[in-house]
Image (spheres, rainbow, N blue to C red):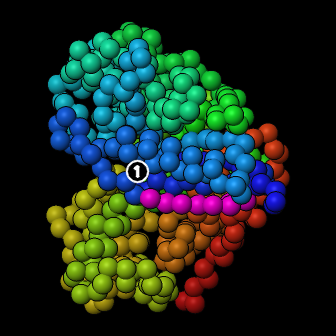
Amino acid sequence: MSKKKKVTIVFDIGKTNKKFFLFDKNYQEVVREYTELPLTTDEDAYPTEDLAALQNWIKDNFNAILDDENFEVKAINFSTYGASFVHLDQRGNVLTPLYNYTKPMDKEILDLFYKKHGTKLKIARETASPQAGMLNSGLQLFWLKYKHPEVFKKIRYSLHLPQYLSYLFTGICVSEFTSIGCHTNLWNYDKADYHDWVYEEEIDALLPPIVPTSASINTSYRNKKIKIGVGIHDSSSALLPYILSKKEPFLLLSTGTWSISLNPFNDESLTDEDIENNCLNYMRIDGKRVKASRFFMGNEYKIQVEKLCAHYGKEYGFHREVQFDQELYLRLMKHKAVYFRFEGIILKRKMITETDLNAFATFEEAYHQLMIELMDLQIHTIQNAIGNSEIQNIYIDGGFTDNDVFMKLMSHHFQHYHVMSSHSPLGSALGASMVISNKKIDETFLQEHYQMKVLQPLIFNL
């Protein structure tokens, strides 16, 4: 009989894709599966995660792996998107839908919050959370208290989503730093404690004790001893392999729906200007701050590319084949102007009433112009995250590492830095596996797992 492979299971829950991975003791991926689960709606008919479907999917996959003769499950952990709370009553029953962080919040409740607790800017600066309604998940508790007081009264514990998934296996309610620290409005970074408003509203009583992100709970499940992690926020998790294996300061540019510049080596407090530029803090697993700046790049890119495909009569997907064209780029830069009206990006830039594509003869030309305009904002957000810290290395991961024009422009604009792309479909799952293990890793780790490539600066033939 062949020896069973010892594995850690990680459930990596994104807004769209739900994934689970099995990793061996050397963090090599053994199994990976993806699914998309249909959404449900909350009491206002707003689309939201179907918590019951998610639980069933997790339990079914977990039990299937336990039954598999090839594997011995040693540990399990969870990484998920943030800004999402599950509210439990005394008996551990779920009280509300898992409210979607894109759901609009009632203006009168927001007005009441700022009237009671301080201006938007003050709260944003102290909690390192640009103000964004439901995306500041602490405000969801305030909203429940004043919009649905009868439900609020029944809450015993409110768990961040990663900790709720852990609770399903342990029955133990905890909080941990990375979930508390991601634009929740809950944490005062300068005081290193919950913000005053949390105590004034007596919401602290609903938040379970804080444990380290590396904590785990040993349990026996179907007569098997398994170590169960407390879960981790996905952005902090994606950063972890870099922090654990790299000694020199670096910035990680994580690209996808959001483009997020993460700098774990900048511990300055945020200024008013930072907040206006959509800077925020995330939290490392030890509670230290990570300065970040973000913009809705992938979302905007998709909107604009769909319009380009329609305008030039191309199939959606054509854009993926476009390679960087130096001649085209230099020509566009000679007459640099703004041609695109962005729809989902709130960063300051020249506003035009509508996108003008008549200036471009081909899809490729218009596409290069789009990338130039997005890159202008990308440069700005990276510089904000770097601040005055000594950074020489920039790592880029996520969807845009496959975009030739984006990567060439990054190598050009950041030629005084050591810029590397890293290809890893593991994203935040690997960090979740590493955080509950005591295994030390070295500099070669990223090379092995992430296919790191150094970007060469462009040399233009002028």
Q: Residue at x 60, y 79 (%)?
A: 458
Left-right relation of 346 to 281: left
Q: Secondary structure at mark 1?
A: loop
Q: Residue 52 location in percent, x, y?
A: 37, 40
Farthest front residue? 1
Q: Which residues are magenta?
A: 27-35
Locate residue 97: give its quadrant: top left
Q: Nearer the viewer, residue 379 or 197?
A: 197
Asked if residue 388 can be seen in this view, the reply is no
Magenta span includes 323 = no
- Quadrant of image for the C terminus: bottom right
Locate residue 24: give its quadrant: bottom right
Determine whether 20 is above or below 95 in the image.
below
Determine whether 364 is above or below 441 in the image.
below
Q: Which residue is label 1 attached to? A: 15
Residue type for callout 1: Lys
